[in-house]
Structure formats: C-alpha cells, structure tokens
Image (cartoon, rainbow, N blue to C red):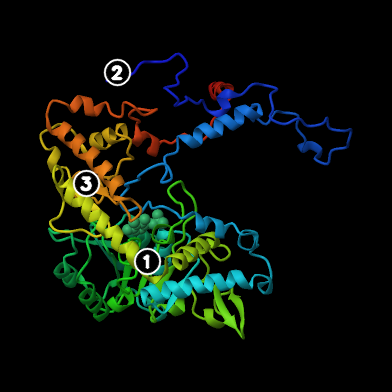
Amino acid sequence: MTKPTTVSGHEGLQLEQALIFEQDTEGTTAVDLPPIPEHVGRLGTFASDELLGLPGLSEPEVVRHYTRLSQKNYSIDSGFYPLGSCTMKHNPRLNEKIARLPGFADVHPFQPASTVQGSLELIDTCAFWLKELTGMVAVAMSPAAGAHGELCGLMCIKSAHDAVRSTRSVVLVPDSAHGTNPATAALCGYRVETIPAKGVGRIDIDALRSRLGPDIAAVMITNPNTCGLFERDCIEIAEAVHEAGAYFYMDGANFNAIVGRLRIGDLGVDAMHINLHKTFSTPHGGGGPGAGPTVLSEALAPFAPVPMVVRGGGEFETEEHAGLGAAQDSFGRMKGYHGQFGVFVRALAYMMSMGANGLKQASGDAVLNANYLLTRLSEELTPAFPGPCMHEAVFDDQFLKGTGVTTLDFSKALIDEGFHPPTMYFPLVVQGALLIEPTETESKAALDQFIDSVLSVARRAKAGDVAEEFQAAPQLAPRRRLDETAAARRPILCWRPKERDENVARQAAE
Ligand SMILES: *Cc1c(COP(=O)(O)O)cnc(C)c1O
C-alpha cells in the first residue's frame, strides 16, 4: 500500500490544514471596522500601539479553517466509537432540544430563587429519579464529573470519620480499579492499598477480608468492574466493610449496564457517583461538561456538599451555606453554583423519554451487544476472562503471540479500516488489553461490520510476516504514528512567533 504524494498536501478530499497563526497575512481581517474617532484614552501609561499578535485572516479563511478542523474530529455522530469504559453512545437530539429551551438555557445562577422555580424543580426531579433508580436516600448533584463525584463521596466518608474523631488512614482499592479511584483517595489524604483480583477478574474477597481492620476508612469498588464483570460478592463485601467500621464506596461509572435492574442501595453501598454523561446521555469525549452526582446512604447523607435544593413551604429554595438548616453537617462547597445544569436537563429528558421500561431495555441491550461482540470476536481474538461479560468485552494479546504485532499496532490498523481504536492497555491487570464497549446504540449490522473488520485484521496479523506492515499503520489517516508519549509529557500548548523565540534566545545570550 503506497500512497501517492500530492503538491498541496491534501489527500483526496481530506484537506491539509496549517495552524491558524501560520495562515496570518498582515493587514487582513474578517471584519471592517470604522476608523476610531479622535478621543482621549483612559488607559494612561498602559496604552499601547503594539499589535496583539492575532492572526490576520479573511472571513472565508476563518470559516474554512474551523470547518476543516471540525471534520477531523471523530465523534459518535460520525461512526462507531468502541472505546471501552467511556460509554460513547448516541445522544438523542430531543435532549439537546430541551436543553436549549430559553427557559433552561438562559437562566442565570444569581437569579432570585422565585424566578427559577422550574429549574430548581428540574434539579429536584432529576435527583428524585437518581435516588429511585439507586435505592439511596440522598444525592449530591453538584459534582462536575465522575472523578469529582468520587471526591464528593470520599469527602463525605472523611467527614463521617472526622465526626467521630476516627483517624482511619487507608483506602482499599482493587488492582482493576479505574485510575481515578486511587487518585481520589490520595487527594483526600488517604494512603491507598491495592487488593488483588482473583484470576477470574473479580475482587479477591478473602484478601479484602484479611486486610480489613481499624485503620481502613473505606473500600472503593467499581461495579460492574473495569474487566466488564459484575462483582457478585457485593453484599458480603458490604457486610464485612461495615463490620470493620469502614464505608463502602462504589464507582458507578458503569451504571449503564445495570440501570433499571438493580438498586445498589440494596447491596449496602454507602456512596456511588453516577456519570450522567455516560449512563444518561450527554455528548462527551471532546472535553465537554459532564456531571457526576453522588448518591449517599443514610450514614453519609448529612455530610453532602452545598448547594442543596430544598422545598421550603411549597417553594423550591437552595441551601447555600454549610452549617445552616439542611446543610448543618455539610462538608462545604465543591463547585460553583449548582453543578452542570445543562447536563441535568439532558439526563432528565433522557430518563423521561425512555421511561422505566426503556432504561431497563437500554441496559439489557448494552449487555447483549457486548456479549454478541465478545462471542463473535472470540473466533480470532482471545477473551481475557471466561464466560459472559456485562457492558464491555476485554481481550488480551495472546492471539497476537509470536506475530510481532502489538495491541497498539493492531489498534492502529483498525483506523485504516475506518474504526476508532478501542481502549488499549486498560484494564492494567490484562496483558495487552483491548477493551470494547459497543453500548446499546449500535445495530446488529453496525456491529457485524466492525466485527468482520476486526476478524479480518486479526487473520492478517496471524498470517505472519506482517509486523512491519502493522507498525506502519495507519496508512490512510491524515497523520501516521504520532509520538503520543511526547505529546502527553511535553505538550506544546502555545504558539509563539519565531521572532519572539529568537528574541528570547538573544536576550538569554546577552
Ligand atoms: C469514566 C470513568 C470514571 C471517571 O469519570 P469522569 O467523568 O471521566 O471523571 C471513573 N471510573 C470509571 C470506571 C469510569 O469508567
């Protein structure tokens, strides 16, 4: 496969695009402004005639620049997005329409409560259904993402221990945990200790039991876990954890696999965050806002953060200050205003349009799709664990053994087939992992097309003598292999004109 090179750098209708600063033409602007009339400036000595360094482009150049960039952004709206753990599912346009209604989109957090009763009721109703679906007594709505919700849960746990002057200092986390779990515990000042998984991808309950003691503040478990498996021993775990005087935190980012089928309150969980942007639809993945409301048990509810929406004599009000009213024992505030209100609107619109049966079917379909994919891909790939999975399927790199092709090479080859690579090398407990989450969104036809492509790439890899070809993939994408480590470790986030660098160098030399 050799690609022709072009004079323009364009490839077919994939247009090459320079940085906007590199397209600068001095004196060009996209707008015509009238000359500034004579006036006396008020900036005094701060006034400056120097150019700001903004690039000069005409209107069509600006429009083309951003349109081309937008077309390079792969998204769930353009195709199947099999990233495991991320739950990239279709976001119904209905939710967007509702979130854009002026009554929701144009309210301001400083408005008097009497003028935003509908918005406060929406937060309250969304909270009601989250409690209903989890069987928990309270929910903190303000956390802005999953990891932020974890922090909220652990801060509640810390407050509960502080309230009884307990100095427990250790949080137990299984080795299959999402990286945010140990990071959250560490941020709260806890020491993190790892609990090994049993060979079958589930937590080793005997190892957990033997480590429980008077120094353990909490146990954090993801369920379904990052191996795509349901932790069956949760009730036993909860009993053991509570007996030891610790709290049971559940990472609920994978709630989309069980919603409508299981109330985690019945398992004895004390706190769990819900990624509204995963389970209840909201576009994410491009850094857009998410929301991580945290449901709480009776023991932790008093410590929930402010603000809280409360009903005071028929009207909705907000409790803004810790130490007052319903927020008597609150640990304080962790987010400006009320949280990600637009995400609440989308989540509630999703829940109400789906209904109880619809939500139950969505989790069922997500699990069915993952198992279909697991079963068919097992023809050539090697599943990391025996038996069925929940909402995502994990494979290890055994099937590539001896081919010289790595999980990374394999994933890059999928780009040439027109598929975004699955999550790679995560969970860490699986050698060379490929983690695939199809979600309920995809049709059987879409899954079959993906599966057929993956199987054919796997057969090609196994046919032998193709390591070099795989190492050169992707061949058909606008960019080839990038130095992803350098990009992550030494990101260049600012564009600077060359002369400025030269000036800095000259000044340094003087
Ligand atoms: C996505 C995810 C998180 C983190 O959620 P963010 O919204 O990205 O902060 C935590 N745990 C698990 C298992 C996840 O899948």
Residue 493 in view (yes/no): no
Q: Nearer the viewer, mark 1 or mark 2?
A: 1
Q: Earlier in the sequence, mark 1 or mark 3?
A: 1
Quarter location, residue 354: bottom left
- Real-space Cα distance between discs 1 and 2? 48 Å
Comparing 115 with 268, the one in front is: 115
Q: Residue furthest front?
A: 445
Relative placement, left or right, of 291 versus 474 is right
Q: Return the mark for residue 456.
A: none
Mark 3 closeness class: few <14, some 14–19, many ≥20 residues within 10 Å: many
Quarter location, residue 448: top left
Q: Residue at x 32, y 47 (%)?
A: 83
Q: Residue at x 38, y 42 (%)?
A: 79
Q: Earlier in the sequence, mark 2 or mark 3?
A: 2
Q: Nearer the viewer, mark 1 or mark 3?
A: 1
Q: Are marks 2 and 3 in contact (CB under 8 Å)?
A: no
Q: Are marks 1 and 3 in contact (CB under 8 Å)?
A: no
Relative placement, left or right, of 396 versus 435 is left
**Residue of label 1:** 359
**Residue of label 3:** 433
Comparing 399 with 202, the one in front is: 399
Q: Earlier in the sequence, mark 1 or mark 2?
A: 2
The secondary structure type at the circle numbered 3 is loop
Task: Name the amino acid type tagged 3.
Answer: Ala
Q: Return the mark for residue 2.
A: 2
Residue 246 appears at what percent x and percent y? Answer: 29, 75
- Real-space Cα distance between discs 1 and 3? 30 Å
Number of marks present in the image shown: 3
The secondary structure type at the circle numbered 1 is helix
Say if 164 sits above or below 470 in the image.
below
- Image region (quadrant) for ligand 1: bottom left
Residue 460 in view (yes/no): yes
